[in-house]
Image (tube, rainbow, N blue to C red):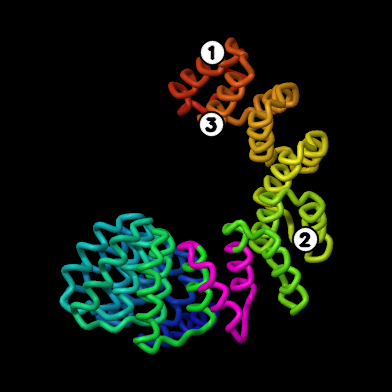
Amino acid sequence: MDLFRVMVRVGFRADRITMVILLTVCGEIKGLEFGRLIHGYIVKMGMECGLNVGNALLDMYAKFGQMSTLLKQFNDMRERRDVVSYTILVNSYIEIGRIDRAREIFDDMAEKDIVMWNSMIHGYVREKRPEEALELLVCMEDESVQVDENTIVSLLAACSSLSNLKYGRYIHRLSLRNNIKQDLFVETALINMYFKCGGLEDAMIIFFKMKFKDVFTWTTTIEGLARSGLETKALELFKQMEKQGTRPNEATFVSILTACRQAGLVDDGCRLFKRMIEVYRIQPSMEHFTSLVELLSKARMWHQAEEFISFIVPQERLAAYKTLLSACMSCSEINLGLKIADKILQSGSVSHEVYVLLSNFYAGAGLWYKVEETRKVMKDFNMKKQTGVSYIELMS
């Protein structure tokens, strides 16, 4: 960027290749304002007629979510658009949640490359519309478009969302039939799909056949075992992972703490939580905290659970308190529940979900006056939530 400023200052005329490079850099590190300056320079120098420069501008505005400017640039390009231009536009609509508009543009295109097909399929998966992602595969096959690795991974994610083992196995066979390289990316997606679709044995066969496994593969398999009720196997696999020298990450510990929570393995859970912090220097997230609170609550270690929450930063305690209150409600631990309910109220955190939880707890405890009081506040909150008043203000 500094070099570009020098070039302009000394009167050196930059070419289109330089502009494409600069716009790419703007999109990644420099910011929108500098991108606009580059655009202004391009217009001044009469360069915007070039397809590559036009697409670079589209891509830059897309990265900053500047949809109106992107559309103007797209319309200005007219006959100079290519499949890359349309792909950027479609991805931009998907990014802002307007997938139906993206599909309209997609359907109007005379020619589509595999990148465009993948964008649309991935968009449907992202928007939790997996059936439509799989329907696009039928369209691809009708038009004799060959799938690639990215297509397979997105389709496997669609099958996972539907928990449809039949479709999942079909996609697996499709990948083999099309000679898709069964690399780390694809195999990890296959493991995830088989676990989520109930194909435990298939998942483990793929896992043990893999020559190389990264942290995502290990984590996916540990999570899958925990989800399948095989918590002890998940713990054994975690130990094997450490033994083979793969460093666990934050998500790995979410999965292994979930396994401990489900199996009621208090000692293992506390040990692993401590190991996460002291050995791997991982800062606990709310998922880690709530898993341990739920584990301690499940073992009826109420004092330890409450004490543990005190170590969480005050402004982040609400989720842990909600977890503990839910446990108190399940186990009819009324006295502690009342104490935790008061702490939730004192936090001033306003949400409909919190009020519902409190109302349910009070109802379970037979404190009907508290139920009525909470429901009144809920009603007031729903009327006044736009004004930003706190629970304490509403109660006073």
Classified by dominant secondary structure, the portion drawn in magenta counts as helix
Q: Using the numbered discs, state the Cα–Cα distance from disc 2 to disc 1 in whole angstroms.
A: 44 Å
Q: Amino acid at mark 2?
A: Met
Span colored in magenta? 196-224
Q: Earlier in the sequence, mark 3 or mark 1?
A: 3
Q: Which residue is mark 1?
A: 372
Q: Is residue 232 visible?
A: yes
Q: Nearer the viewer, residue 374 or 183?
A: 183
Q: Which mark is residue 146?
A: none
Q: Residue at x 36, y 68 (%)?
A: 166
> Most extreme residue toward the front, as rendered?
201
Q: Which mark is residue 276?
A: 2
Image x and y of residue 197, in percent: 45, 63
Q: Which marked residue is nearer to the observer: mark 3 or mark 1?
A: 1
Q: Eyeballing the image, is 31 above or below 274?
A: below
Q: Residue at x 39, y 87 (%)?
A: 17
Q: Residue at x 48, y 27 (%)?
A: 385
